[in-house]
Image (cartoon, rainbow, N blue to C red):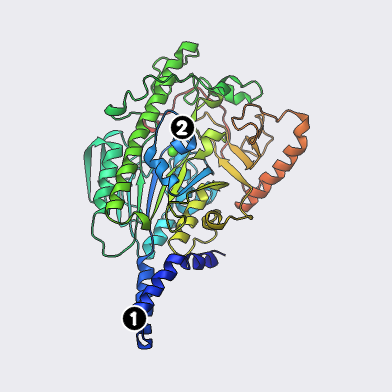
Amino acid sequence: MQQHERQELDCTPLSRRSFMRGSLAFGAAPSLLAAGATARARRRDRRPNVLFILTDDQRSDAIGLGGSRRLKTPHIDRLGREGIHFKNTFCTTSLCSPSRATILSGLYAHAHGVVNNFTEYPTDLQSFPLVLQSQGYDTAYVGKWHMGEENDEPRPGFNWFVTHKGQGKYFDTEFNFNGRRREVVEGYYTHVVTDMAEEWLSRSRDDKPWLLMIGHKAPHSFYYPEPKYEHAFDDVRIPYPETAFMLDDKPAWIKDRLRTWHGIYGPLFDWRKEFPDDRPEAVKDFEAMTRAYWGTLISVDDSVGRLYRLLEERGELDNTVFVFMSDNGILNGEHGMVDKRTMHEPSIRVPLVVRYPGLTPPEKPKVIEEQVLTTDMAPSILELCGAPPLKDIHGRSWVRLVQRGDRGWRKSWFYHYNYEKQFPYTPNVRGVRTDTWKYVHYPHGDGSPDRHMAELYNIEFDPEERYNLIGNPKYAGVVKELKAELARTMKQAGLTQATDKMPLDEGIKSELPEESIR
Ligand SMILES: [Ca+2]
């Protein structure tokens, strides 16, 4: 089917016009061979570039198009207003390294093997950058990679690779330039990687198409905006969300999390010095934390604007698949939580906008409502580039969905998170999300019955997940159906109850994580 779709893409009016121009220019029959060669060359030239901007822990509503009221992101929004806003995009595991590996490979975490933040992307595993490189693309990665905590060396699939160890720092990070030299680059991370991206884009590379991935540190904790945006939201009042106080029908582990590293009464990534603190006035720390989180994102939006202008100046904007996405979402007080990992909406929803006139003309932007996943990125990009598809992956290309609609598009999907000993604030999570319902349960890890209450939400009518319906007998039938759907979607992802291995849930603990991995 994908082959068929690629052929259709090649027959866009643009390509037919180009072919006609080529034929007419040469005119007479003896020149047809030459004309064919020219048309082929033009076809090759037309392969789009790819600029993939990946942020870290950005909520789907932390862009204007996603509903942000206070934080303005005009440049990110512009990509969507001239392209596609995928309104319902989700990560299949809400954790940095697993999700990044999913975006590259099109596979679920249990299949690519990067199930925590301490695992390297397997060197023998395919990825969309590897495929594009093999197809003659000039490929580069600049910024936060974050798979393999202590490794800042180049990774397969990229001709140019600049990263750093671990999380990097908002100011003055030491980068490793393509494995040749390490250097502390002074300045604010977001602008430093944008400078590097601009430098690389400005290199001469004949007519070769290119792929550039930029990994921002922002808006990952600990949040440090650049000085000019430090006070951008000083006048904004930010209360704890209402759902922080609606925990009575929720599993007990959610209450246990409140006073931990990942709860609203905990240290709030250093914004609260004395903790736990559940006094109402301690909300000022939560407010300061949220303002700083937003502040880091203004710089990201500036960066998108700079790159948009550069591509425009270079005449490359309209032949570039311009992607803006985050690896996972983040909870900002919902259900009394900070951080991510859980299957609640703010944790699994990510922003995704794509601008590419070859897919949809800028004057006819689209909003896609269907549920799109991180697994879908690799196959979609490869299809847009006319490259061979990755084999046996879990994701599917959304190209047809965008262009003509796709009645066969998924109506449900499976979520996967494994308990981390280093961050004992979230149990093992397995769940299924349909267009209407979400069912989540928390396996103990040894095959014994669950020890935590499950959760059931009607996300169509209760998108904020205020009311856990799991205990309501009226929905017993729905739960039964969703359990079957979970098994079906797991099987689709290559897992059964028997093959689904996970760590033992050691419970929610109040200890702080090791300083070096915070
Ligand atoms: Ca992340």
| Amino acid bearing label 2 | Ser
Residue 260, relative to residue 161: is it above or below? Answer: above
Local SS, label 1? helix
Spot occupied by residue 158 in the image (x, y as percentages of width and height): 34, 56
Q: Nearer the viewer, mark 1 or mark 2?
A: 1
Local SS, label 2? loop
Residue 201, relative to residue 25: is it above or below? Answer: above
Left or right relative to 260: residue 135:
left
Spot occupied by residue 340 in the image (x, y as percentages of width and height): 50, 33
Count neighbours of disc 2 (C-alpha within 10 A) and say few if under 14, some if 14 to 19, many if 20 or more.
some
Count neighbours of disc 1 (C-alpha within 10 A) and say few if under 14, some if 14 to 19, many if 20 or more.
some
> Mark 1 CB in 8 Å range of ligand 1?
no
The residue depicted at 37 percent of the width and 65 percent of the height is 46
Quadrant where the image shows the N terminus = bottom right
Name the residue nearer the viewer: 473 or 410. 410
| Amino acid bearing label 1 | Phe
Q: Could you tell me if residue 58 is visible in this image? A: no
> Distance between the Cα atoms at labels 1 and 2?
54 Å
Spot occupied by residue 274 in the image (x, y as percentages of width and height): 41, 14
Residue 430, relative to residue 382: is it above or below? Answer: above
Quadrant where the image shows the C terminus = top left
Residue holding disc 2: 68
Residue holding disc 1: 26
Q: Could you tell me if residue 517 is visible in this image? A: yes
Left or right relative to 489: residue 356:
left
Left or right relative to 495: residue 351:
left
The residue depicted at 66 percent of the width and 27 percent of the height is 467
Name the residue nearer the viewer: 362 or 372. 362
Query: Which quarter of the frame holds ligand 1?
Result: top left
